[in-house]
C-alpha cells in the first residue's frame, strides 16, 4: 500500500460477486435485481404509475402528435359520402309448397341460403357494369381517373385493363352484408359525390331485382319449351301404348283392366279377367274332386263285396260312404237282411233237434234243406250286390278319367290365358304410366305458363338510399377519440419500452443494488434540468445561499465522508467519474468549500491536466500549477498555490500547462512526494481527476490516495459504465468509500429531498 494511503475501506472489501451482471442469463431491472432471481421490475401499481409520471410529457407528446396526424390526414384526404339501401329477401313460395311440419325445420336454413346467395349476386361484376353504364360513372371521379392510356375512348367491353381497374374500384367502394338474424341485406356505397352514392345503391338494388325477374322468366320459358317438346313425344307414346292395349284385348278376348288403390298413397294396376276358360277350369276342378271321391268309395265297396261275406255286406249299410247308392240300395240290404233273419232261427232249431233226436230225424233233414235253400238265396243276393258294385266302380273310374282329361285340356287353355293376362297387364301398365306422365307434364306446363305471367318477386326494396349531408370519411367525431386513445396507448408503450431499454441509473438504490456500494449523497437537480452551481469566480451556493437544499446536500456529503473514516489521519480524497460532464469538478469545488467552512485547511488539486477548469472558479489564470510542480519536484508547492477570494483556508493547485503525457507524471515519485507534502500541510486534500473510463490518470491516482469518491450522473451514467468503473477500481485495489449521485430529479425521487420541502422560493433566492 502506498504510504500516502490510510486505512479507509477500499474496493478490496467489496466482494466481486456483489457486482450484479448487466447482460447474460438475467437482465437487471430498474432496481438492479436480475430477472431470474430478483423481484419483478414493477412490484406494485405505484411503480407503474411512477413510470407513467416520469414519461408523462412523452406520452402527452405522442398522444397529441397522433391526434394531430389524424386531423392532418382527415384534412388532406378527399371526403367520401355514404348511402345505404336495404333489400328484403322473402322465402320463395314454390320452395315452401309442402307446408308440413317436417318442412319447418329446414325453412330457416333455406332463407339463410337465399340471403347468402343474393348477397353474392349483388356483388357480381355484371350488375356492377350495368350500374356503371346506366349512371355514366366513367365521367365522374374517381372512375374517370382510371383510364388506361392505350384504351382511352374505348367502351368497357373492349377495354379489359380499364374494366378490371374500374371493377376493383367499384368493389372497393361497395359493401354488401346481411343483417344478422334477419332477411335484410344492406347495400352501402361510398363516393365523393353524395348524389352518386345514393344513385348507385338504388340503381344496383333495382337492377338486382330486375335481373332476378329476367332470370326467372328465362328459366320459366326454358322449362316450358322443354316440357312442350317432351309432351309432343310423350303424346305419341300414349297413343301407341293405348292402341296396342286395345288390339291385344280384342285378340285375346280379355277385358276388365281396373285401377285400384295400392293403399300407400298411389294407384296400382289390377287385371281382372272374366273369361269362360277360367270359369270352366274352376267347374272341372270341382267335378274332378267329386269324381275322385265317387271312384274311391265305389272301389272300396267293390273290394269289400268281393269277400262274399254276408255279414260284411250287411255291415256296409252302417258306413257313411259317398256314392254306392246303386250298389247297396236299401231294398237289396233289406232282402239280404230278411234272408239272414230266416236263416238264424232255422240254424237254431236245427241245432236243438240235433241234440235231441240225432242226425237221422226227418225234421232235421227238412230243416237242413231249408237252411241250404236260404244260404243259396243269400249267396245269390251277395253275388248280385258284387256285380252292381263292380259296375259302379268301373263307371266311377271311367268318369274320373274323363273329367281328368278335360281338366288337363282346360289347364293348357288357362296357362295360355295367364300368359296373355300378364302381357295385357304390362301393356296396360305402360299405357297408364305414359298417360300419368303426360298429364303430370301437361300440368307443369300449365303451371309454368301461369307463373310466367306473374311478375311478383320475393325481393323488395325496404329502404332506398338517401343523399347524405355529412361525409362518412373523415368522421371527426370518431377519428379524434380513436386517435387520442391510440396515441395514449402508443405513448404508454413507448414509455415502458424506453424505461426497459434505458440502462441508466436514476436513484441511489439503482447504484446500491448494482454494485453493493453505498451512495454517500445525491445532489438534486433544479431549474429546468440545470444544477444551481454558479461558476462565477469565488461564488458558491454554500456561501451565497447556505439555506438551499443543494447547500444542505453538500453538507450531507461532507458528513457522510467524515463518518466513513475509519481513522482520523485520512486526508487525501480523489473525485472522478466514468465519463466527462458528470459534474465531478463542480462537486470537488463545492465539497472543498464545505470542508473549509468547518475551519479545516483544504487543498484542492486540479488533476485534470487534459481539461482544466478549477482555476475559473477561483478567478485565476492557469499559467503555473501541478504540471510545473511535478516537473520540478525539488521546489515547494507553496509557490504554486492560489487562495480562494472569500476563504483563506481554501487553496487551489491549478493544473498548469498541459503536458504531453499526463499519466506519466502521476506515475512518478514526484507525485508521491507532492501528496506527502500536502498531507503534512493540510487537513484535507481533494483531487479532481480526468474521467475514469477514457483515461488512465484517475486509475493511477486512485492507488495513491486515502479514499476514492466516484461521481455518477443520474439518467446519464449507465449500469454498464458503473459496473466497468467498479471492476477497474477493484482491480486497482482503490479505496472506494461510495458514490455521489449527481443531478437527481425531484419528480423521480421526491422523498430524497434535503431540508424542508415546503419552501418553494429556493430557486428565486439562488437567482437573487
Image (cartoon, rainbow, N blue to C red):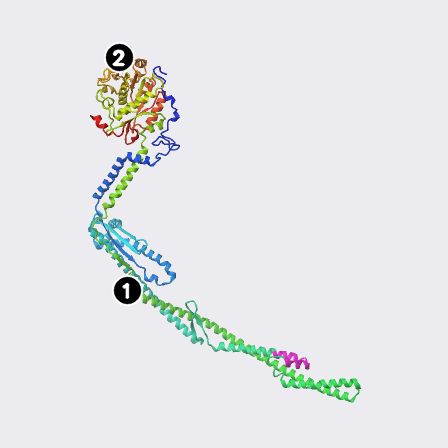
> From mark 2 to mark 1, how far is it between C-alphas?
124 Å
Residue 646, horizontal then vertical, whole percent: 22, 18
Front residue of 47/431: it is: 47
Extreme-top residue of the structure: 634
Q: Is residue 580 visible?
A: no
Q: Where 752 sits versus 234, above or below?
A: above
Residue with the mark numbered 1: 454
Residue 325, horizontal then vertical, whole percent: 61, 83
Classify residue 658 by image quadrant. Answer: top left
Q: Is residue 282 visible?
A: yes
Q: Residues within 10 Å of mark 1 (few under 14, many from 20)?
A: few
Q: Where 35 sits versus 73, above or below?
A: above
Q: Residues within 10 Å of mark 2 (few under 14, many from 20)?
A: few
Residue with the mark numbered 2: 638
Classify residue 581 by image quadrant. Answer: top left
Image marks 2 and 1: residues in contact by CB distance under 8 Å: no
Classify residue 623 by image quadrant. Answer: top left
Front residue of 766/168: it is: 766
User: Which tag, 2 or 1, sits closer to the chain's start?
Assistant: 1
Front residue of 643/183: it is: 643
Numbered disc 2: secondary structure: helix
Q: Is residue 10 magenta?
A: no
Front residue of 256/87: it is: 87
Q: Is residue 313 magenta?
A: yes
Q: Is residue 513 left or right of residue 617?
A: right
Residue placed at 49% from the left, 77% from the top? 279
Q: Where 45 sits versus 378, above or below?
A: above
Mark in the foreground, 2 or 1 = 2
Q: Which residues are magenta?
A: 297-318
| Secondary structure, magenta segment, majority class | helix
Count of numbered labels shown in the rendering: 2
Amino acid at each position: 500500500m502506498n504510504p500516502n494511503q490510510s486505512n479507509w475501506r477500499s474496493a478490496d472489501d467489496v466482494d466481486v460477486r456483489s457486482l450484479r451482471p448487466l447482460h447474460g442469463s438475467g437482465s437487471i431491472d430498474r432496481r438492479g435485481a436480475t430477472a431470474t432471481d430478483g423481484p419483478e421490475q414493477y412490484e406494485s401499481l405505484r411503480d407503474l404509475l411512477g413510470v407513467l409520471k416520469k414519461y408523462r410529457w412523452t406520452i402527452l407528446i405522442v398522444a397529441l402528435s397522433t391526434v394531430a396526424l389524424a386531423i392532418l390526414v382527415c384534412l388532406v384526404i378527399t371526403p367520401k359520402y355514404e348511402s345505404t339501401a336495404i333489400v328484403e329477401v322473402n322465402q320463395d313460395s314454390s320452395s315452401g309448397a309442402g307446408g308440413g311440419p317436417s318442412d319447418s325445420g329446414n325453412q330457416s336454413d333455406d332463407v339463410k341460403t337465399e340471403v347468402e346467395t343474393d348477397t353474392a349476386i349483388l356483388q357480381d361484376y355484371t350488375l356492377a357494369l350495368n350500374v356503371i353504364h346506366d349512371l355514366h360513372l366513367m365521367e365522374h371521379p374517381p372512375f374517370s381517373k382510371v383510364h388506361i392510356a392505350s384504351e382511352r375512348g374505348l367502351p368497357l367491353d373492349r377495354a379489359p385493363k380499364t374494366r378490371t381497374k374500374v371493377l376493383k374500384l367499384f368493389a372497393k367502394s361497395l359493401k354488401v352484408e346481411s343483417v344478422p338474424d334477419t332477411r335484410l341485406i344492406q347495400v352501402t356505397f361510398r363516393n365523393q359525390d353524395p348524389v352518386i352514392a345514393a344513385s348507385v345503391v338504388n340503381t344496383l338494388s333495382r337492377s338486382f331485382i330486375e335481373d332476378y325477374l329476367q332470370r326467372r322468366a328465362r328459366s320459366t320459358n326454358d322449362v316450358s319449351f322443354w316440357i312442350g317438346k317432351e309432351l309432343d313425344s310423350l303424346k305419341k307414346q300414349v297413343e301407341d301404348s293405348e292402341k296396342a292395349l286395345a288390339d291385344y284385348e280384342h285378340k285375346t278376348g280379355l277385358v276388365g283392366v281396373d285401377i285400384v288403390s295400392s293403399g300407400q298413397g298411389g294407384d296400382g294396376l289390377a287385371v281382372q279377367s272374366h273369361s269362360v276358360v277360367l270359369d270352366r277350369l274352376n267347374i272341372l276342378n270341382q267335378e274332378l274332386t267329386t269324381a275322385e271321391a265317387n271312384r274311391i268309395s265305389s272301389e272300396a265297396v267293390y273290394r269289400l263285396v268281393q269277400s262274399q261275406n254276408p255279414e260284411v255286406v250287411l255291415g256296409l249299410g252302417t258306413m257313411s260312404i259317398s256314392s254306392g247308392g246303386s250298389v247297396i240300395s236299401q231294398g237289396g240290404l233289406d232282402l239280404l237282411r230278411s234272408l239272414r233273419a230266416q236263416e238264424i232261427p232255422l240254424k237254431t232249431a236245427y241245432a236243438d233237434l240235433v241234440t235231441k233226436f240225432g242226425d237221422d230225424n226227418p225234421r232235421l233233414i227238412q230243416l237242413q234243406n231249408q237252411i241250404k235253400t236260404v244260404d243259396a238265396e243269400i249267396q245269390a243276393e251277395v253275388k248280385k250286390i258284387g256285380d252292381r258294385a263292380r259296375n259302379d266302380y268301373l263307371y266311377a273310374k271311367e268318369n274320373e278319367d274323363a273329367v281328368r282329361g278335360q281338366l288337363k285340356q282346360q289347364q293348357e287353355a288357362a296357362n295360355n290365358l295367364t300368359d296373355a293376362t300378364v302381357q295385357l297387364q304390362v301393356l296396360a301398365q305402360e299405357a297408364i304410366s305414359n298417360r300419368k306422365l303426360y298429364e303430370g307434364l301437361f300440368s307443369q306446363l300449365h303451371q309454368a305458363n301461369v307463373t310466367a305471367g306473374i311478375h311478383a318477386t320475393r325481393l323488395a326494396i325496404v329502404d332506398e338510399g338517401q343523399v347524405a349531408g355529412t361525409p362518412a370519411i373523415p368522421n371527426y367525431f370518431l377519428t379524434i377519440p380513436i386517435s387520442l386513445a391510440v396515441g395514449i396507448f402508443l405513448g404508454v408503450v413507448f414509455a415502458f419500452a424506453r424505461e426497459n431499454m434505458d440502462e441508466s441509473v436514476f436513484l441511489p438504490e439503482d447504484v446500491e443494488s448494482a454494485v453493493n456500494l453505498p451512495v454517500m449523497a445525491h445532489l438534486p437537480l433544479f431549474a429546468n434540468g440545470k444544477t444551481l452551481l454558479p461558476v462565477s469566480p469565488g461564488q458558491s451556493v454554500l456561501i451565497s445561499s447556505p439555506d438551499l437544499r443543494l447547500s444542505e446536500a453538500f453538507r450531507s456529503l461532507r458528513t457522510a465522508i467524515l463518518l466513513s473514516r475509519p481513522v482520523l489521519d485520512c486526508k487525501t480524497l480523489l473525485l472522478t467519474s466514468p465519463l466527462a460532464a458528470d459534474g465531478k469538478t463542480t462537486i470537488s469545488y463545492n465539497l472543498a468549500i464545505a470542508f473549509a467552512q468547518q475551519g479545516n485547511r483544504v487543498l484542492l488539486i486540479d488533476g485534470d491536466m487534459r481539461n482544466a477548469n478549477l482555476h475559473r472558479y477561483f478567478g485565476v489564470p492557469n499559467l503555473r500549477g501541478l504540471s510545473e510542480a511535478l516537473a520540478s519536484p525539488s521546489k515547494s508547492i507553496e509557490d504554486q498555490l492560489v487562495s480562494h477570494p472569500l476563504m483563506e483556508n481554501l487553496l487551489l493547485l491549478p493544473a498548469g500547462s498541459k503536458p504531453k503525457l499526463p499519466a506519466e507524471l502521476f506515475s512518478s515519485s514526484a507525485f508521491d512526494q507532492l501528496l506527502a507534502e500536502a498531507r503534512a500541510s493540510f487537513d484535507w486534500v481533494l483531487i479532481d481527476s480526468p474521467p475514469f473510463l477514457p483515461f488512465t490518470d484517475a486509475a493511477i491516482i486512485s492507488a495513491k490516495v486515502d479514499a476514492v469518491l466516484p461521481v455518477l450522473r443520474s439518467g446519464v451514467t449507465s449500469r454498464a459504465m458503473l459496473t466497468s468503473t467498479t471492476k477497474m477500481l477493484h482491480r486497482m485495489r482503490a479505496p472506494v468509500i461510495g458514490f455521489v449521485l449527481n443531478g437527481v430529479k425531484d419528480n423521480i425521487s421526491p422523498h430524497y429531498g434535503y431540508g424542508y420541502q415546503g419552501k418553494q422560493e429556493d430557486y428565486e433566492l439562488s437567482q437573487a
